[in-house]
Image (cartoon, helix red, strand yellow):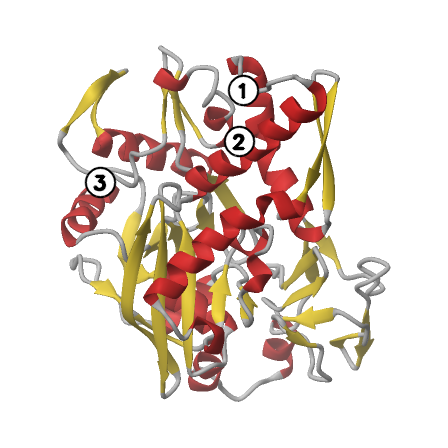
Amino acid sequence: MAVILDLLDTSIRLLYEEKAINSNGFVFNTGNEFIFGEVAEKNYRTQPREVNNKFWWQLGTESLQLSFGPARHTADLVHQHLLSLSQDASESNEIALAVSGSMSKEQLSLLLGIIEQCPFTALGIIHRSALLAANVSTHTSILHLELQLHQAMIVELERRDDSFSVTGSSVIPGMGWLQLKERYASVIAANFINQTRFDPRKQAHTDQLLYDQMPVLINELFEHDEAICEIQGHVARLCSTDMQHITDELIIRVRGIHQDLNQRPVLLETPTSTLPGINKIPNIISSGTLRPSLIETIKLDPNSPRLIKTAPCATASMKKTSKPIDEKLAKKNRPTHWMDEHFTAHPLGDGIISDNIRLHCIEEDWFASQANQLTCNSNPVSRQPLMPGDQLQFNDEVVVLINLRSDS
């Protein structure tokens, strides 16, 4: 089965059916080698000249303005990043590229050329918004708000027959994940100064400590009215209302493009879905992970840089590929494990995943026990048997059901 290489720079991922390999679009030049992902990001404030986070966004062959190790241009850094991912990869080396619509045709052609120099075989290029919409949505018309490192993008999708197609998109400059974190960090630093006279941004080391805590603090302020931040013994009390104006600006920018925002379902991924105050958007659809199984229903051309903007809905692809089910096949279509947020698989066992998420088995089919606030694929729990790929969520607790097949 094909593997999806999801090229959203906030979290670049190799997605297998049962696991994922993550590495965001940061690179750290140690002087001897390039280190990518979260380790690189942890040097962003302390050694800013040795960290680059624009190489995916600015993918090209123009010479770098500032020297960065042996890299001549951003294409070199993308090549090294893909090689780094390939070292952790396993199983199939055939990949379908899921890309943002902001990538130009020239960048897509360059990307295919880079892939040829890596131990991967590119099967084709698909608009990631179409894949996400087909995976989770049953609506006829939706918007996808995508948060990249240096910009946001709003994508319009329409359902036609049993497929979702991208019909338009707009870039929102200056509202990327890094810019939002910078503004949130400034508010937190102001709280420290007002409450303790300590400025965490005055020194690079403490600025990095604050930056490292930002994702957790943002998530806490989404879930709760208050949060506590501690840096080198200094403690500041934070309020979600202090952050609201930053998220409001993003929503206002989106509404400036789509005045009918209140009437349209909006598809959000992490971290967009956990920004403090983002729930001012009336109709939010939380996105799950991309399903590699969807790739089998899409006609791909390995030799073309053409971006495919249509993806069949998950339910439609199941209907089209359905065959007479014998006993052996039926067993393979049932979940056997559940996967936590760290992509660790656990046997279903007696069906008790946690105090809030419980399953019960009837004639080898698994069903979710009814509970308030428990959802399946962002919808209320139904009485239908659960399938591999289903996402169960209770507040911030999320698990994905999977099938780990044995060769026997």
Q: Which residue lies under the disc numbered 1?
A: 201
Q: Residue at x 50, y 81 (%)?
A: 138
Query: Residue 29 appears at what percent x and percent y?
Result: 37, 18
Mark 3 against mark 2, which lies toward the viewer? 2
Rounded to the nearest angstrom, the CA distance separating label 3 from label 2 is: 38 Å
Of helix, strand and loop, which one carries label 3?
A: helix
Q: Is residue 403 left or right of residue 46?
A: right
Amino acid type at circle 2 is Ser
Q: Residues within 10 Å of mark 3 (few under 14, many from 20)?
A: some
Q: Residue at x 41, y 56 (%)?
A: 146
Of helix, strand and loop, which one carries label 1?
A: loop
Q: Residues within 10 Å of mark 2 (few under 14, many from 20)?
A: some
Sequence-wise, which precedes: disc 3 or disc 2?
A: 3
Q: Which residue lies under the disc numbered 3?
A: 114
Q: Which residue lies under the disc numbered 2?
A: 186
**To which quarter of the image does residue 309 belong?**
bottom left
Query: Residue 404 appears at what percent x and percent y?
Result: 62, 59
Q: Is residue 304 left or right of residue 271?
A: left
Amino acid type at circle 3 is Ile
Of helix, strand and loop, which one carries label 2?
A: helix
Residue 284, numbered circle: none
User: Is residue 385 or residue 269 the one in the foreground?
Assistant: 269
User: Is residue 316 or residue 157 the one in the foreground?
Assistant: 157
